[in-house]
Amino acid sequence: MKQIKLAVIPGDGVGVEIMPYATKVLDAVADLHGGLKFEHEWYPYSCEYYLEHGEMMPRDGLDQLSQHDAVFLGAVGNPKLVADHISLWGLLINIRRGFKQTLNIRHAKQLRGIQPMVTNPGGFDLIVVRENSEGEYSEVGGRIHSGEDEVVVQNAVFTRKATERAMRYAFDLAKTRKGHVTSATKSNGIVFSMPFWDEVFEQVGQDYQDIEKRTAHIDALSAFLVSKPAEFDVIVASNLFGDILTDISAAVMGSIGIGPAANLNVDGTHPSMFEPVHGSAPDIVGRGIANPIGQIWTGKMMLDHFGESELADQLLTIVEDVTESGMKTPDVGGNATTGEVSEEIISRIKQLT
Ligand code: NAD
Ligand code: IPM
Ligand code: MN
């Protein structure tokens, strides 16, 4: 029996509503396999936890989580209770950095039964490789002056190692797909980091002669992503650009609520973390209408990560069978609840057992 030990962190908002269903889906998929079992341990780290304990997770939180094979996370953030920079840096970014999850892989493709933003007869299928450890998300800077002449400096940090790592991953991934990589740049406006980014793309690209390479400025790229998503295969982007592109790519599929993501520890020293693209969605919390597909598809990416690609593909096929049947949450044009969509997915998995 293959056992995968999961640290489950529902987090805040819709994360709490979706996670019980998403873990049930994973358990049903494991039963389908027969020789696979998920062991889950639940952790209450969240904004509520912060109010009680004064921190988003205990001092030895990372040690506890490191006892598991992977972290399965819902969403973090309840700005009414705790400022976002405290909750997100205390938990989500703390885990990404602490566990050296240097890449964030986010898939977007046209799903059966979900109306995409723009109709594409042949569909589209793209993956964004987001640098996940540095870039614009840096702690270098500060408030320099106050008062009338107030000045705040926020630096961005780009290392050759991390930049190369993201690009190599993107090129290697493209080899297994349609064979092209688009680099998101802004070297026309940002004078240090982005010319460096272009230079590394060019250099690393020389090792990948068979891959078609494109470079596009982030502004134009964002527009193309909406109007012509089918033209992309793999996109490699800095931390912030990748963040923005992947809310867009999820919306292009039909809803932010369906985008999956994997925060990968590529050197194998720590667990990877799987969490959807979307956040805690405070505007719809408590109504039972959050789309569970982002979290469930994220579970599919986790199955791929653990070498269970056949099972992973079966899961996504069932998700699409369900959306195609019309059983969908309101964000993608249906009137079903989180529970109804999830239970339908579970019951179809069980029919195969
Ligand atoms: P958000 O992704 O939570 O919501 C953006 C929009 O998408 C909202 O209209 C929301 O209702 C909708 N949406 C999101 N998930 C959905 C789902 N599953 N089903 C249907 N609709 C869904 O982004 P936001 O409003 O900018 O952020 C809310 C909070 O979440 C903030 O505290 C933010 O910092 C945090 N956040 C956390 C993560 C994370 O934990 N990975 C990611 C993004 C935002
Ligand atoms: C995401 C989120 C986070 C990010 C925030 C909440 C810090 O938007 O995972 O996409 O910017 O990385
Ligand atoms: Mn984001």
Image (tube, rainbow, N blue to C red):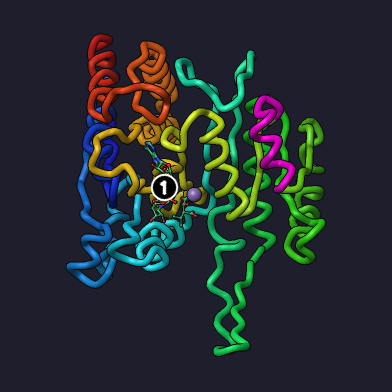
- Residue at 44% from the left image edge and 54% from the top image edge: 269
Residue 88 percent across, percent down from the top left = 39, 61
Q: Which quadrant holds the N terminus?
A: top left
Q: Main secondary structure of the magenta part?
A: helix
Does the beta carbon of the residue at mark 1 sit less than 8 Å from ligand 2? no
Vertical placement of 28 versus 84: above or below?
above
- Examine the structure image and report whether residue 229 is included in the region drawn in magenta: yes
Label 1: state its secondary structure.
Answer: strand
Dot 1 crowding, Cα within 10 Å, few <14, some 14–19, many 20+: many
Residue 116 placement (x, y as % from top left)? 54, 24
Query: At 22% from the left edge and 30% from the top edge, which residue is drawn?
Result: 24
Residue 36 x, y percent position in the rendering:
27, 27
Residue 327 is situated, as x and y percent measured from the top left of the image, at 33, 17
Q: Is residue 328 magenta?
A: no
From the viewer's perspective, is residue 281 above or below residue 302? below
Residue at (33% x, 45% y) in the render: 74
Is residue 191 something one can see in this rendering?
Answer: yes
Which image quadrant: the C terminus? top left
Q: Which residues are magenta?
A: 219-231
Q: Tell me the amino acid under the disc marked 1.
A: Ser
Q: Quadrant of residue 236?
A: top right
Up/down of 47 relative to 108, above or below: below
Name the outermost residue toward the front: 148
What is the residue that sits farthest to the left in this orientation?
Answer: 52
Residue identified by numbered label 1: 272
Q: Within the image, what quadrant is residue 17 found in?
A: top left
The residue lying at 39 percent from left, 44 percent from top is 275
| Figure label count | 1
Say if residue 35 shows up in the picture. no
